[in-house]
Image: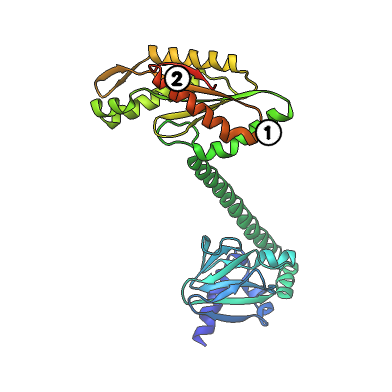
Amino acid sequence: MQELESDRALTAQNLLFRNVDFTSVEYMLERSHVRTLAAGDKLLQPELPNEHLYLILEGELRVHLAAQQTVEHATLVAGECTGEISLVDGKNPSALVVAAKPTRVLAVPHDTVWSLVDQSHDVARNLLAIIAGRMRHDNSALITSHNQRAQYEHQATVDALTGVHNRRWMNDAFPRVLHRCALNKQHSAVMVLDIDHFKKVNDSYGHLVGDAALKSLADIMQHNLRPHDLLVRYGGEEFAILLPDTALGEAKSIAERLRKMVAANEVVSHGVAFKITVSSGIAPIDEVSELETSFAQADEALYRAKEGGRNRVEIAA
């Protein structure tokens, strides 16, 4: 008898009966029953239909999205309820609901829920508020998840040191742009460049100063390339640039302009001031299928620029 009174008090405290004269509606719960769940027991599952609204009397439930059952989506405690959305739309639950610890719930049959709604405007209003709150929480979680995913994708495709895109991004972006250029019958060029004697910079001043040199070079290129040019950090001190809709003559002019700007710039870091130079190799590229070959040709041209004295631009033979 004492347990029945305790359950009655816990039921009356549920959000569904907020501001409701519970004595006027409790008789309608006669067909409801208490379910006891052990930790790990499943209350709702996406593959099974739901016929009840569950009012949590004691314990704790964890909600996991169907597509991410290892990730906790929400926690429900005494005074809250679950199953309301699937009860309203008549579809299977969209989430897996599991007991996080020993939990007791009052299972209210769906026809009883609708009778309560018909009987009490306050119950109807509370049910709407519960559903609205759940949807608002779900929307917030989706936005958070989207933002996190966007952040992870950004981190996965951007070089952490220089802030320019990395090789992983290049493998997707370069072919995509080249395909568009091929459709428009536009000639393009690829440029590879690196810092001359970069090992000396690291050996003389340390890796932190070497990092500053890389960032300085990246900044110059980011601010002085055209908006449609694609810049990536290709290797240690090596960068690659795709120049869409660009003939070899114009590509060489762009490379020379960058070379001069880099040579004139002073790098200042950790109390050290010095200058760097870059060597560049350029190769034509017209089709996506030529990308690997053009990179190899640009690398050969870069090698000739190094052999020719550095601080030079060479075009593939």
Describe residue 275's horizontal placement relative to residue 50 as left or right: left
Seen as rendered, the residue at the extreme bottom is 1
Name the residue rendered at 56%, 74% in the picture: 42
Residue 59 image position (x, y, % from top left): 48, 73
Describe residue 291's horizontal placement relative to residue 199 as left or right: right
Residue 120 image position (x, y, % from top left): 71, 66
Residue 311 image position (x, y, % from top left): 40, 16
Give the residue pinned by disc 2: 220
**Around disc 1, counting alpha carbons within 10 Å, would you say few (fewer than 14), some (14 to 19), or many (20 or more)?**
some
Seen as rendered, the residue at the extreme front is 317
What's under tag 2, amino acid-wise? Answer: Ile
Q: Give whichever of 66, 1 is nearer the camera.
A: 66
- Is residue 231 shown above or below 169? above
Position of the C terminus, as image quadrant, is: top right
Q: Secondary structure at mark 2?
A: helix
Give the residue pinned by disc 1: 179
- Is residue 28 shown above or below 71? below
Name the residue rendered at 73%, 25% in the picture: 185
What's under tag 1, amino acid-wise? Answer: His
Describe residue 30's horizontal placement relative to residue 254 as left or right: right
Q: Mark 2 or 1, which is nearer the eye?
A: 1
Residue 315 image position (x, y, % from top left): 53, 19
Q: Give whichever of 160, 105 is nearer the camera.
A: 160
Name the residue rendered at 49%, 43% in the picture: 156
Which picture quadrant has residue 93? bottom right
Residues at circles 2 and 1 in contact by the CB criterion of under 8 Å: no
Q: Secondary structure at mark 1?
A: helix
- Is residue 185 shown above or below 36? above
